[in-house]
Image (tube, grey):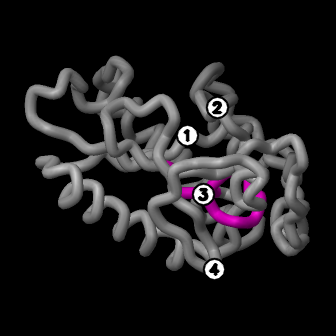
Amino acid sequence: MCGDYSNPRTRLKRELLTGATDELETSSSLCEYKMAEPQPDENCIFCRIVAGQLAVARVFEDDSCVAFLDHRPVFPGHVLLIPRKHYETLADLPADQIAPFFTNAQLLSRAVEQGMLAEGTFVGINNRVSQSVPHLHVHVVPRRRGDGLRGFFWPRQRYASDREMTRVQGLLVDAITAIRTGA
């Protein structure tokens, strides 16, 4: 597990669940953790795929990433893109790896659409919740109108009021500021 996530993620979760707005103690350990070089995790199925210990249907690879067909696809052509190094979530991916990683996600989105004659793609990441393998991965799924998927895979709801939306907006703006300033 990486660093101390008490700032501002816990604060946001606490405020959303309880309405409490008291300040929580913050730490810089998240930044310190990110500077450590990740080591392959021998128990991680994706690290084993990168190492060539497990056979998969690879569709792309470069110095930083590997992409392969999901063994239980939503639809044929469902691809997973993973970084070669073991990062658990998007928050753990170093800043200098974001552009290459998402350039490859963009390439795969185009390729899945073209190669599968799809009308579009769904591109998504789960961070911890619903993340079946604790190694960062992007799903690129071919989409067609009438394919049975309805927008997001969970029920959507409106904010209770404009005031509630403004409160949540403020929490996120504060969290972004705290992350960017290292507070």
**Mark 3 or mark 2, which has the lower sequence index?**
3
Write the residue at 62% across / 21% down: 17
Write the residue at 43% across / 74% down: 103
Local crowd size for mark 2, using a 10 Å CA cut-off: few (<14), some (14–19), many (≥20): few
Q: Position of residue 150 (x, y in %)?
A: 22, 25
**Quick check: marks 1 and 3 in contact, CB under 8 Å?**
no
Please name the amino acid that badge 2 sits on. Ser
* Part of the protein shown in magenta: 80-90
Instruction: Report which residue position mark 2 lands on.
Output: 132
Instruction: Report which residue position mark 3 lands on.
Output: 82
Instruction: Report which residue position mark 4 lands on.
Output: 63
Q: Is residue 86 magenta?
A: yes
**Quick check: marks 1 and 2 in contact, CB under 8 Å?**
yes
**Mark 3 or mark 4, which has the lower sequence index?**
4
Please name the amino acid that badge 3 sits on. Ile
Write the residue at 33% across / 45% down: 77
Q: Position of residue 134 (x, y in %)?
A: 72, 41
Q: Position of residue 159 (x, y in %)?
A: 33, 26
